[in-house]
């Protein structure tokens, strides 16, 4: 899966480079100097903030979740899990548009994204327990990211951070690790087929869209959160139960 994602990512990044270059040359009101320290600070913080926003959307909008769920399909948590990457990077490259728009050179955008991605690779491990409290407070750590990959009710949709966990603390999505998670999706995929892992959710979206009885329901199945269903259906009742389990745990 990782080898194929390298090929598809290369394609999407070439498209992004063309688009970012056009934005930087023709639209950006100013150009930030690549040799200035503050440009690099803006870059790293900007990439990380935009990654948080994209990652949160990827868990709350089903169409984007369809690209991301393969990464969460592993029932193990190690460096190989980090290599389970999506084949469709279209939503992600759109999220970086603000960076060339504020004048960051396109080549720097890719360096910033690469730094973020390499950092995230090393938090996919069970071999490191919790680190010193100041580190755990500021940075995304293996402990925080284990929570993100858990399918336990109290761990769902938590800890979206790339490098800095402060985004989750600021926006109410932080959850500390209180026990080792159960990894994987809430509904096991039951297949080792790379093709099925990457496409199964798209197929489910199409099936739900076709059987929807109204335009509102069609939009809900595509752009609603994973598990969304029209009110009054069995699927909707299950989603309510899930929400109660998550938010009920928060209130304890």
Image: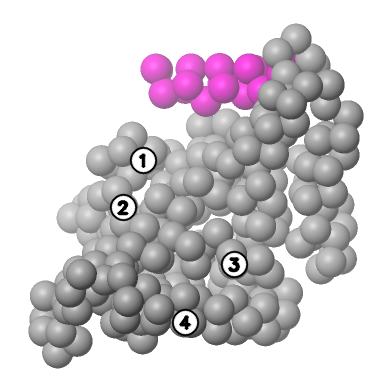
Determine the CA span between mark 3 and mark 1.
Answer: 25 Å
Determine the CA span between mark 2 and mark 4.
Answer: 28 Å
- Nearest to viewer (mark 2 / mark 3): 3
Proximity of marks 2 and 3: CB atoms separated by less than 8 Å: no
| Marks 3 and 1, the one that precedes in the sequence | 3
- Nearest to viewer (mark 4 / mark 1): 4
Proximity of marks 2 and 1: CB atoms separated by less than 8 Å: yes
Please state the horizontal and vertical placement of residue 47, each as a whole percent of the image: 33, 66
Inspect the magenta stretch and tell me whether residue 180 lies in it. no
**Residue 89: image tag:** 3
Circle 1: is it few (<14), some (14-19), or many (20+) Cα within 10 Å? many
Circle 2: is it few (<14), some (14-19), or many (20+) Cα within 10 Å? many
Q: Which residue range is magenta in the image?
A: 236-252
**Residue 174: image tag:** 1
- Nearest to viewer (mark 2 / mark 4): 4
Q: Secondary structure at mark 4?
A: helix
């Amino acid at each position: 899966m990782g080898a194929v994602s390298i090929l598809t990512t290369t394609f999407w990044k070439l498209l992004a480079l063309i688009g970012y270059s056009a934005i930087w040359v023709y639209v950006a009101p100013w150009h930030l100097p690549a040799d200035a320290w503050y440009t690099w600070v803006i870059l790293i913080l900007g990439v990380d903030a935009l990654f948080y926003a994209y990652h949160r959307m990827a868990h709350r909008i089903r169409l984007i979740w369809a690209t991301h769920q393969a990464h969460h399909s592993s029932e193990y948590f190690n460096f190989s899990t980090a290599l389970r990457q999506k084949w469709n990077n279209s939503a992600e490259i759109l999220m970086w548009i603000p960076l060339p728009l504020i004048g960051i050179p396109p080549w720097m955008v890719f360096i910033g994204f690469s730094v973020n991605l390499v950092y995230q690779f090393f938090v996919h491990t069970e071999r490191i327990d919790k680190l010193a409290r100041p580190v755990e407070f500021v940075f995304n750590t293996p402990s925080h990211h284990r929570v993100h990959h858990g399918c336990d009710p109290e761990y769902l949709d938590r800890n979206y951070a790339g490098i800095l966990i402060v985004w989750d603390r600021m926006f109410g999505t932080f959850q500390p690790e209180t026990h080792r998670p159960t990894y994987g999706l809430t509904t096991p995929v039951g297949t080792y087929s790379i093709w099925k892992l990457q496409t199964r959710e798209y197929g489910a979206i199409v099936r739900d869209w076709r059987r929807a009885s109204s335009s509102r329901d069609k939009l809900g199945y595509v752009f609603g959160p994973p598990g969304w269903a029209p009110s009054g259906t069995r699927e909707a009742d299950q989603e309510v139960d899930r929400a109660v389990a998550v938010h009920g745990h928060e209130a304890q």
